[in-house]
Image (cartoon, grey):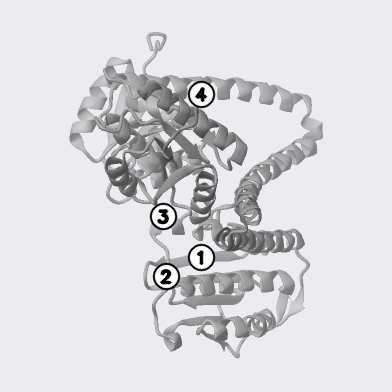
Amino acid sequence: METISRKAKILFIEDEMNMRFFLKTLLETNGFIPIMARNGREGLQLARKELPEMILLDVMMPEQGGALTYVKIREDFDLRGIPVMILSGIARQTFFHYLDMVNAGKTEKIPFPDAYIQKPPEPEHLLHWIQKIVNNRNHETE
Amino acid sequence: MNELKTKSPILLVDDEEGIRRVLGISLADMGYQVYTADNGEKAIELIRTIRPPIVITDIKMPGMNGIDLLCRIKKEFPDTEVIMITGHGDLNLAIKSLKFEATDFITKPIHDDALEIALKRSHERLSMRNQLKSYTEGLEDLVREKSAKLLEAERMAAIGQTVAGLSHTIKDLAGGLKGGAFVLEKGIEKKDMGYLNQGWEMISSSVEKIAALSMDLLNYAKTSEIHCQICHPDQPVEEVMELMKSRAEKEGVVLQFVSDKNLQPFAFDPEAIYQCLFNLVKNALDALQNIHRKSGDKTITIRSLHCNGWGVEYRVEDNGCGMDRQALGMIFRSFYTTKGTGGTGIGLMMTKNIIDKHNGEIHAWSEQGIGSRFTVKLPK
């Protein structure tokens, strides 16, 4: 099996400090480069600047929340290809219903996120999904 | 919606005339008898007279906003289905309204498809509720003589809700502990002081929160029944002063007690009332914690006042951060907290329960950046 020659950058957008510590440690100790943002606005700016391999996104955040941020990522020409995992305390069906409502009547529908994990996450589970998504992307772009 | 034979009334609340007109046309086309209101007060009046099963309201309106209106409707007419219109496509407000039992939300610009999904959901819920009602009505006939059992069931349902709220709080705490343990483990594995310190910090803050939660629960359990005895109303205040003096001093807060000499002993539960006053003073201290005021200028005043027809009126005032109107409307609800993950949302709920059991009154006044005042009246 080939190993990834360069470290993948992963952006996570999360307002809670403890969660940021946890994600930073999880990513660092597994060979990723974590990039942190505290809210959606900051996250979008960093995403455009760094073009990460993947984005982890919280939903309930002050100022610009994750739902609107997700829509903006998917509507941004440079960012729409980046896989997004939603990591939130909100039930999966609530978020998916939100997207259905946003999509109603739209011709170009916003796709569902690449993964949805409800908080609190199991480290192994979370890591499994992150690795899977990043590896898939590397094969695609090779 | 073709199956609607007689026109079903629907109320549309929005301060923008354009939305009322356009959405009104769509709704009328779907076969509804459309009523409109341009503000919350008018909406409430209309609901009282026409009793629409479905209300559609904008969230952002001047005066009474959509969430306030939703709460009013759910309080007065809990069977009404309320659909919210959210303006800027953000989920935060929508989620908030779902927490207050909104049926659904639609985002602006409004598409007929979204409107139909939301309306279909409302009708499903209405018919489900009707079925349930006729079922339970039949059931009540059967067990009329055992009505005590039904009361018990209702009580159990209330406990169920409490447990659900509580388990959410505990889940968050467990998440914090788990995250901390993970970071700590990595620190041990890699002998990395940075991870060790961070992990430890995360764990100890979660442990502190768990300790606070268990204390709140314990006190809540203790005050589930009240035991009245003749007692001077200043006694519980003095006990609170005694206990809180050192914390107040440490945090640079002037804590003072102004007593009314005309007060007479009367029957109440001194331990439960002590708990109430303790909660109020603790909240006041929390409200003063992160504000920039000179040490000597931070004050909490407890007053005991003589009040005609009542045993006592207590006032707890602070000049802390205060709350906005929306928070003020919700503070007595179970598990509502303004302190983020730092609060449990139990303190004020417990306080209100105790005051209610005394047939007393509790009122809150607050203004952001100025402070808060809680007034408690106990009957003789």
Image location (x, y in percent) of residue B67: 40, 44
Identify the residue at image location x=67%, y=25%.
B137
* Label at residue B126: 4
Q: Is residue B53 visible?
A: no
Mark 3, other Cα within 10 Å: few <14 / some 14–19 / many ≥20: few
Secondary structure, mark 1, is strand
Identify the residue at image location x=61%, y=60%.
B196
A93 vs B379, nearest the viewer: A93
Q: Nearer the viewer, mark 4 or mark 2?
A: 2
Q: Amino acid at mark 3?
A: Gln
Q: Is residue A127 above or below residue B346?
A: above
| Alpha carbon separation for disc pair 4 and 1 | 35 Å
Mark 2, other Cα within 10 Å: few <14 / some 14–19 / many ≥20: many
Q: Earlier in the sequence, mark 3 or mark 1?
A: 3
Q: Earlier in the sequence, mark 4 or mark 3?
A: 4
| Alpha carbon separation for disc pair 2 and 3 | 15 Å
Q: Is residue B113 above or below residue A71?
A: above
* Label at residue B363: 1
Residue B305 falls in image quadrant = bottom right
Q: Earlier in the sequence, mark 4 or mark 2?
A: 4
Q: Is residue A34 visible?
A: yes
The answer to whether B130 appears left or right of B117 in the picture is right
Q: Is residue B130 above or below residue B196?
A: above
Mark 4, other Cα within 10 Å: few <14 / some 14–19 / many ≥20: some
* Label at residue B321: 2
In which quadrant will I find the C terminus of chain B?
A: bottom right
